[in-house]
Image: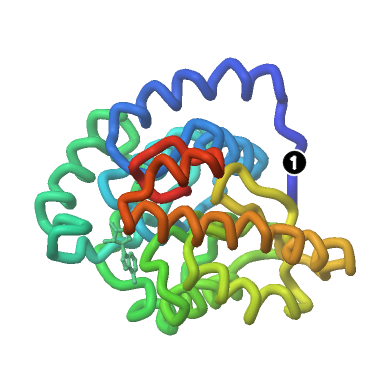
Amino acid sequence: MQESPSTSSSEERFPQVWALADRISGWLSRDQAELLHEQARALPDGAHALEIGSHQGRSTVVLGSVLQAKGGRLYAVDPFIDGKLFGGSKTRDSFERNVAEAGVGDTVELVCDYSTKIRSSWTKPFQLLYIDGKHDYWTFSDDLKWRVHLPEGAAVLVHDCFSSIGVTLGVLRHVLFASDLRYERRAGSLALFRLGRPTRQDRLRILGEMPWWIRNVFVKVLLRLRLRPVARLLGHDSPYDPY
Ligand SMILES: C[S@@+](CC[C@H](N)C(=O)[O-])C[C@H]1O[C@@H](n2cnc3c(N)ncnc32)[C@H](O)[C@@H]1O
């Protein structure tokens, strides 16, 4: 299923895509956007992808730009939850404006609903899954089940992996001992898994991330306690949680 991307043109095009995405507020770092871009580039022409959690469209624009060039499609699933954290209808307005301004409106199809609500009735195939919705253990565990739609070798990318407690517990419970998903690598908290039988090394790589996860949880506690100078000693020089 994987095609080898032409690295030179990938390198040329990522900065343009990032320039579009980086105008949009959100939690995706440059390294993470590059990993999403790389994995979307490896998809065949006409491929479809599904994103859970789009917010204002930062990651949507990265995936949408690559899929547009391939004549593909991106399903962007987000219910635009009301409230201070995610902003409700105002966030939806920003999402629609940002997607249009980036010129990917013809490729991105907004599915304004909860991933957990629509999963069991979903029938459209897709070849890449990006999970960045609600980060509690139960929602994330359910979101992992979307992989039944993916072909062997497809990428499953998970944001806030080995930084969020809920997501990491979900990985330990549902991926560490799974027989169809293997862990490859991460860019910050964006982890790349792939549909396929894991080796012992793949499983050990997940366990190898535990010290980083514990460090991130510790940093979060320090930030809540307003102990930023102590967090700095752990290499975290930001007021925001590690991601
Ligand atoms: C961390 S933000 C996503 C950030 C986005 N990927 C970006 O690059 O900026 C999480 C989003 O998930 C959405 N969300 C929460 N629960 C969800 C669910 N069950 N299904 C889909 N989206 C959900 C929220 O409305 C919010 O917009």
Q: Quadrant of residue 97?
A: top left
Is residue 217 in view?
yes
Task: Give the percent coordinates (x, y) of residue 106.
Answer: 32, 40
Mark 1 residue crowding within 10 angstroms, few (<14) / some (14–19) / many (20+): few
Asked if residue 225 lies left or right of residue 193, the reply is: left
Q: Quadrant of residue 99?
A: top left
Q: Residue at x 49, y 19 (%)?
A: 15
Task: Give the percent coordinates (x, y) of residue 213.
Answer: 59, 60
Which one is in front, 184 or 163? 163
Is residue 152 in view?
no
Q: Residue at label 1?
A: 3
Asked if residue 18 lies left or right of residue 95, the reply is: right
Q: What colour scheme was applied to this rendering of the protein?
A: rainbow
Which one is in front, 46 or 29? 29
Toward the right, the furthest residue is 200
Which one is in front, 158 or 154? 158
Q: Residue at x 39, y 38 (%)?
A: 238
Task: Give the percent coordinates (x, y) of residue 1.
Answer: 74, 52
Q: Residue at x 47, y 63 (%)?
A: 164
Query: Vertically, is 234 above or below 196?
Result: above
Q: Residue at x 37, y 72 (%)?
A: 115
Asked if residue 225 lies left or right of residue 97, the reply is: right
Query: Vertically, is 232 above or below 194?
Result: above
Task: Give the percent coordinates (x, y) of residue 30.
Answer: 49, 31
Q: SS of the residue at dot 1? A: loop
Q: Looking at mark 1, is its residue's CB closer than 8 Å to ligand 1? A: no
Amino acid of disc 1: Glu
Tell me the quadrant of ligand 1.
Answer: bottom left
Q: Quadrant of residue 206?
A: bottom right
How many numbered callouts? 1
